[in-house]
Image (cartoon, rainbow, N blue to C red):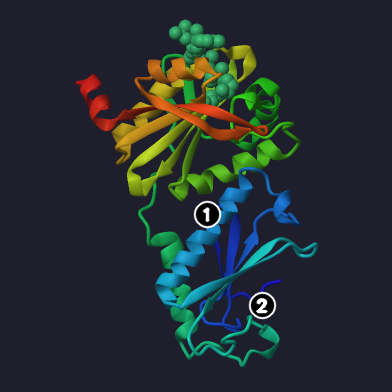
Amino acid sequence: MCRSEPDAAVRLEASWVLVGPDDPVRGYACLVFARHVIELHDLTDDEGPALMRDIRKVSGAIARIMNPVKMNYEVHGNTAPHLHVHVFPRYHGDQFEGRPIDPRIAKRPAYAPGEFERFREQLANDLISGRARMAPQPILQTERLVLRPFVLDDAPTVQRLVGAREIAETTLTIPHPYLDGMAEAWIRTHRAAWEAQDRGTFAIVSNADGLVGAIGLHFRPPHRRAELGYWIGRPFWNRGYATEAARAVIRFAFETLPLNRIHASHLTRNPASGRVMVKAGMQFEGILRQHVMKWDRPEDLAEYAILRTAFEAAGA
Ligand SMILES: CC(C)(COP(=O)(O)OP(=O)(O)OC[C@H]1O[C@@H](n2cnc3c(N)ncnc32)[C@H](O)[C@@H]1OP(=O)(O)O)[C@@H](O)C(=O)NCCC(=O)NCCS
């Protein structure tokens, strides 16, 4: 699988990153997908983007540390051990110049004395400790709801509620049918996604009805904005749960995170979601015509947002 005995491993959102002193090229890294899968198309809708985020993160870190001319990437779908990705930095005058990397003819070691140890430390710093850490995901409380991180025990309820066709019909990333194991795999991504400042996902738990849905923010730190998304199980619609949860998450986000804008969009044939956005204080911004394909049909999106200035003015 990966080229040599790994000397260090860092756990990212969806994969392990392995590096070793005997690797064929300076700054090489191997990402091994954290769950046993064989091919790229075995990944769930959430796992694919998560793996791509890991690849981009590692690629960016290596580029910053080693300053290569460019990168080569190889994705290997394997039965044993399983899916993994090689990231090879390329340099002027490297021993494979003008050719693909071939570890069998590599002159070892690729690293000068002490160079690997420095690279390993800088990579770990860049991937883990070099960025501002998120505080642990909080539990939010409202009059009728508790919004808390999901736990694996929620998986059967998630599968039952989110597996209903009515939920997949008006959302873009929820697979249908929703198969065994998908809820567990989804929940397992949450912690790392939070720590990576990528996504924050809360279970919506009602005092009266138990776990009724989910709400989440997808962060875009460079733009200081986040996208809000949610679903409520069909038996619990029109009780105000989505609105109550959306208000709480928007308040939490503006009060504790350096966000400037929170936006959300819905398919125009899903006006109930638009009502939730308006009731949560968001403003309608316009229609994006045929912006998305839903089950092979182009669909219009209605876009809403609330800016920090409006949130603060409303609270004043
Ligand atoms: C959209 C969704 C989250 C709403 O959840 P909810 O808990 O029922 O929402 P709320 O009860 O807080 O508010 C629903 C509002 O929509 C209104 N509504 C319901 N059906 C409607 C319809 N067909 N047309 C217009 N408004 C409608 C309700 O009357 C209510 O507004 P009101 O308080 O002004 O009367 C829920 O229907 C759902 O999960 N749908 C499937 C997944 C989804 O679409 N997620 C959002 C993706 S953008």
- Label 2: element kind: loop
| Mark 2 residue type | Arg
* Along the line of sight, the residue nearer the viewer: 139 or 285: 285
User: Along the horizontal axis of the image, is 306 left or right of 73?
Assistant: left
| Quarter of the C terminus within the rendering | top left
Q: Nearer the viewer, mark 2 or mark 1?
A: 1
Q: Residue furthest bottom?
A: 107
User: Along the horizontal axis of the image, is 180 left or right of 290?
Assistant: right
**Mark 2: few, some, or many residues within 10 Å (few <14, many ≥20)?**
some
Where residue 56 appears, as percent x and y from the top left, is: 50, 60
Q: Which residue is disc 2 drawn over?
A: 3
User: Along the horizontal axis of the image, is 8 left or right of 114?
Assistant: right
As drawn, the label of residue 181 is none
Is residue 126 shown above or below 279? below
Q: Which residue is disc 1 drawn over?
A: 53
Marks 2 and 1: CB-CB under 8 Å? no
Residue drawn at x 48%, y 90% is 112
Q: Residue furthest top?
A: 239
What distance separates the C-alpha of mark 2 from that of mark 1?
A: 22 Å
Where residue 155 appears, as percent x and y from the top left, is: 67, 33
